[in-house]
């Protein structure tokens, strides 16, 4: 089962991402200063991530 958005934000922070800025609505833009990568999450903290978004995030972070 995919995690909630708040848990995905925690995973991003644990992998070196910081909150660069908030976007429109529930969007949050994360930035990794060491790699220069950006990642945008959509949804309120209590919402569940869609499975394709979770799979893409896991692949990007190198998680299994």
Image (spheres, grey):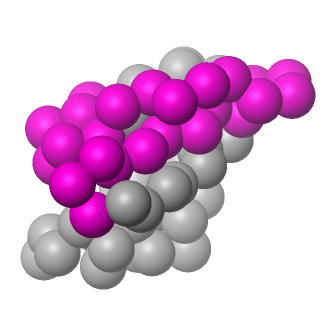
Q: Considering only vertical position in the picture, is 5 above or below 55?
A: above
Residue 64 % position (x, y): 13, 76
Q: Considering only vertical position in the picture, is 11 above or below 9?
A: below
- Quadrant (top left, top right, bottom left, bottom right) of the N terminus: bottom left
Count of numbered circles on the image:
0
Name the residue nearer the viewer: 47 or 19.
19
Magenta span has 17?
Answer: yes
Q: Residue furthest right?
A: 24
Name the residue nearer the viewer: 22 or 64.
22
- Asked if residue 5 can be seen in this view, the reply is no
- Asked if residue 50 can be seen in this view, the reply is yes
Q: Which residues are magenta?
A: 10-35
Name the residue at 17% across, 75% down: 62
Q: Considering only vertical position in the picture, is 22 above or below 29?
A: above
Name the residue at 52% across, 30% down: 20
Relative placement, left or right, of 63 versus 38 is: left
Magenta span has 11?
Answer: yes
Residue 37 % position (x, y): 42, 62
Residue 6 % position (x, y): 41, 26
Relative placement, left or right, of 14 versus 12 is: left
Residue 54 % position (x, y): 44, 63
Name the residue at 32% across, 49% down: 32
Q: Quadrant of residue 52?
A: bottom right
Name the residue at 68% across, 41% down: 42
Name the residue nearer the viewer: 31 or 6.
31
């Amino acid at each position: 089962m995919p995690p909630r958005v708040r848990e995905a934000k925690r995973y991003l922070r644990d992998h070196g991402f910081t909150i660069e800025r908030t976007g429109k609505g529930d969007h949050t833009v994360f930035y990794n200063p060491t790699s220069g990568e950006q990642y945008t999450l959509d949804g309120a903290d209590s919402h569940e991530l869609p499975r394709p978004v979770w799979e893409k995030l896991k692949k990007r972070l190198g998680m299994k």
